[in-house]
Image: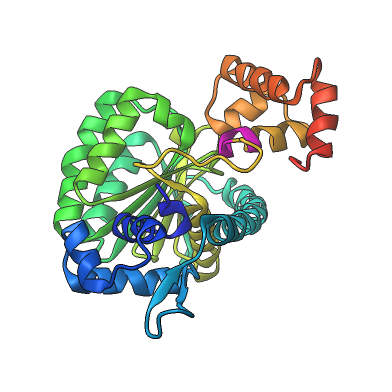
Amino acid sequence: MLESLGLDKLTEKVYRLLLTRHDLDVDEIAQTLDVEIDQVRAALDHLAELALLRPSWDLPGGFRPVSPEAGLQTLLQQRQAELARQQQQIAQAQSTIADLIDEYANHRLGSQTSSIGTLIGMDAIQARIEELSVRARIEIVSFMSHRAHDPRALEIAKPLDLRVLGNGVAMRSVFLESARHDPSTMAYAQWLAENGAEIRTAPTLPVRMTIYDRLTALLPLEAANPRKGVVQVFDTGVLTAVLSLFETIWDAATPIGIPPPRDDAGLSPRERQLLKLLAAGFTDEGAGRQMGLSQRTVRRMMADIMEQLGARSRFEAGLRAAERGWL
């Protein structure tokens, strides 16, 4: 599947067909693939936009496909460069939001201004979530930064989710990539997607947060303990920052129905993120906490990476990873 490079299923089918059947015209392509002519024309236009289809020299008014070696490799390199830029933006945004959380961490119950307010206790937090969800009219976006969620809490959340989606409110959520290995969380994420929400996963998430209609954000008082309390943020400047963080991570995240892609080195986004965290000085426990992984999983992943590098120690693995441009 080439959806990560911008080709939908039909466009890919047309491209594959033209690679072996250069002589087909629009009508013949439509008949071969059993689709409408307008769909074929749209697919051809899209292939031309991606530089995978060019005018034919031999057939005036005709077209020829660009070989996969030339066309797809170029698209892949562009996608990798884009992901590298996004990862840099994510790192900068994560630092910004960490500062924002520290700034508001000293606010306690009863302290409220025009731009912030604090909620302490799960009852108060849940009541505010329900209120904001019902009032939402445009969009709710969120980071679900736990690897595993209480199955009972997920079931309780479903009626409210259905009400929000039934009101025509767009819902976009990013889960930790490690949640793909938790059956309850994965089932809930897939259920959301089946009911109209857009769900993606990312190797790491800075904090759990939810933003309602781009007007109110709920952020944890303590990133490590979201149950302790949340800060309600209404300030335009802060909302702009957290929305920018969300969009940056969203763009780099992987849709729930697609396996996370591997890069040229054969590394998954999760493996590359783990290398970056360990190279930055995180312990196995700290890196696991950032990524929602157990220490056992972190060590198993590092053992696999060391095997790929042919390294006998982590120090040697670090050197070889740097030599190969992995870091």
Give whichever of 167, 128 is nearer the camera. 167
Residue 11 is situated, as x and y percent measured from the top left of the image, at 34, 61
Name which residue lies at 30% across and 41% down.
126
Return the residue nearer the eye: 128 or 18.
18
Left or right of 87 in this view: 65: left
216 with respect to 39 (left or right):
right
Q: How many marks?
A: 0
Residue 277: x %, y % from top left: 70, 35
Q: Is residue 233 left or right of residue 22?
A: right
Residue sitting farthest toward the front: 58
Examine the rendered structure and indicate whether residue 110 appears above or below residue 322.
below
Q: Is residue 228 visible?
A: no
Say if the magenta span includes residue 1.
no
Name the spot of residue 274 as percent of width and height, x first.
Answer: 65, 32
Q: Position of residue 53 (x, y in %)?
A: 45, 70
Residue at 54 percent across and 49 percent down: it is 107
Please state the extent of the stretch shown in magenta in the rendering: 268-272
